[in-house]
Structure formats: C-alpha cells, structure tokens
Amino acid sequence: MKMGGIGLGGILVIAGLLVWFLADKMVLGIVIALIGLIAFGGFAKGKWY
C-alpha cells in the first residue's frame, strides 16, 4: 500500500508519533512507530529513517 510516496510503514510511524504526543501514550506510540519501521521499512522503501 502506497499513498503519495508514503507507504504503510510511514503511515504507522506517523500514527505512532501522533499517539505519543496527542494521546500522551509514550510506550504505545513508540511500539506503533517501531512496528512501522521494522516491519514495513520506514517512510520510503529501501531507506531507513
């Protein structure tokens, strides 16, 4: 799945950051962001951020 150059991993990383800052759930936000980075390769396929 790819939307505007951002894949599913990027969406999960952004969602994790939003959960962390907006819902004040640091651990849950970090877990979601790590899943996005590890499982789906981050923002751009082949590039790690």
Image (spheres, rainbow, N blue to C red):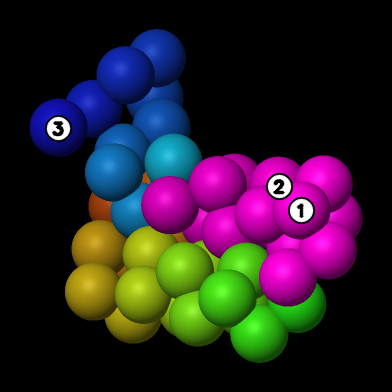
Residue 48 in percent (x, y) is at: 48, 70
Question: What amino acid does circle 2 point to?
Answer: Leu
User: Predominant secondary structure in magenta?
Assistant: helix
Local crowd size for mark 1, using a 10 Å CA cut-off: few (<14), some (14–19), many (≥20): few
Local crowd size for mark 3, using a 10 Å CA cut-off: few (<14), some (14–19), many (≥20): few
Question: Would you say 1 lies left or right of 19 here?
Answer: left
Alpha-carbon span between mark 3 and mark 1: 26 Å
Question: What amino acid does circle 1 point to?
Answer: Ala
* Magenta run includes residue 13: yes
* Magenta run includes residue 43: no
User: What's the magenta region?
Assistant: 12-25
Residue receiving disc 3: 1
Quarter of the figure that contains the N terminus: top left
Rendered position, 4 above or below 23: above
Q: SS at mark 1?
A: loop
Residue nearest the observer in this picture, 26 or 33: 26
Q: SS at mark 3?
A: loop
Q: CB atoms at circles 3 and 2 under 8 Å apart?
A: no
Q: CB atoms at circles 2 and 1 under 8 Å apart?
A: yes
Residue at the image position 52 percent from the left and 68 percent from the top: 33
Mark 3 against mark 2, which lies toward the viewer? 2
Residue receiving disc 2: 18
Residue at the image position 73 percent from the left and 70 percent from the top: 25
Residue at the image position 85 percent from the left and 55 percent from the top: 21
Question: Would you say 23 lies left or right of 48 here?
Answer: right
- The reply to whether residue 28 is in sight is yes
Q: Earlier in the sequence, mark 3 or mark 2?
A: 3
Name the disc covering residue 23, or none: 1
Quarter of the figure that contains the C terminus: bottom right
Rendered position, 8 above or below 16: above
Question: What amino acid does circle 3 point to?
Answer: Met
Residue at the image position 23 percent from the left and 74 percent from the top: 39
